[in-house]
């Protein structure tokens, strides 16, 4: 399992600003995702996976004392793809794990599940908690910086509109 690391200098971050838009897979039909904390499809049981696929890590830094660091993983269960969130707790210096998204395996490929579960999770955060666009990409995994940037534009398009002249 890939253990996320938090970059401590700009040199450790992937390229942020000049990143090409990525071609991402269209959302499959149907794509019946279940998204949220403590939500799961009926009958699903799980333990922390041994070898989930590391998707990448993003960070929000609202102030020096108010940050959020999320690392994302994808695991294929018996019937569902599961999006795992590893949330860094800087008070204890550890990663707290929880499942935040599911979609039936028959409805999506690995890449489709990774892209659309994560964008659904960000949409959930935006709607439920007013989550804004992440401030930077800390690490790439199976999802490259261009993928994460493009997905961010899907979820938060207003941030990326050109400013009107005037």
Image: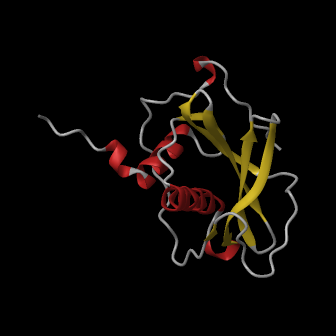
59 or 32, nearer to the observer: 59
Residue 8 to residue 66: above or below: above
Residue 27 to residue 53: above or below: below
Q: Is residue 133 left or right of residue 70?
A: left
Q: Residue furthest bottom?
A: 42
142 or 65, nearer to the observer: 65
The answer to which image quadrant residue 154 occupies is bottom left
Q: Is residue 80 left or right of residue 1?
A: left
**Residue pictured at 65% horizontal, 45% vertical:** 142
Q: Position of residue 133 (x, y in %)?
A: 47, 44
The answer to which image quadrant residue 95 occupies is top right
Numbered disc total: 0
**Residue pictured at 41% horizontal, 51% vertical:** 156
Q: Position of residue 98 (x, y in %)?
A: 76, 57
Q: Is residue 102 left or right of residue 129?
A: right
Q: How is the image coloured?
A: secondary structure
**Residue pictured at 86% horizontal, 57% vertical:** 48
**Residue pictured at 49% horizontal, 61% vertical:** 127
Q: Which quadrant is home to the C terminus?
A: top left
Q: Residue furthest left?
A: 166
Q: Which quadrant is home to the N terminus?
A: top right
Q: Is residue 36 left or right of residue 130?
A: right
Q: Position of residue 47 (x, y in %)?
A: 88, 62
Q: Position of residue 33 (x, y in %)?
A: 61, 72
């Amino acid at each position: 399992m890939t253990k996320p690391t938090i970059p401590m200098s700009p040199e450790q971050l992937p390229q942020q600003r000049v990143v090409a838009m990525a071609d991402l897979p269209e959302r499959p039909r149907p794509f019946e995702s279940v998204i949220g904390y403590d939500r799961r499809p009926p009958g699903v049981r799980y333990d922390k996976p041994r070898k989930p696929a590391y998707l990448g890590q993003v960070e929000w830094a609202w102030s020096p004392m108010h940050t959020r660091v999320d690392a994302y993983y994808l695991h294929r269960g018996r019937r569902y793809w599961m999006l795992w969130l590893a949330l860094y707790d800087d008070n204890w210096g550890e990663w707290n794990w929880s499942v935040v998204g599911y979609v039936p395996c028959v409805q999506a490929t690995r890449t489709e599940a990774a892209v659309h579960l994560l964008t659904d999770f960000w949409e959930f955060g935006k709607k439920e908690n007013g989550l804004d666009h992440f401030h930077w990409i800390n690490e790439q995994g199976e999802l490259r910086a261009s993928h994460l940037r493009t997905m961010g534009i899907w979820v938060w398009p207003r941030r990326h509109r050109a400013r009107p002249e005037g």
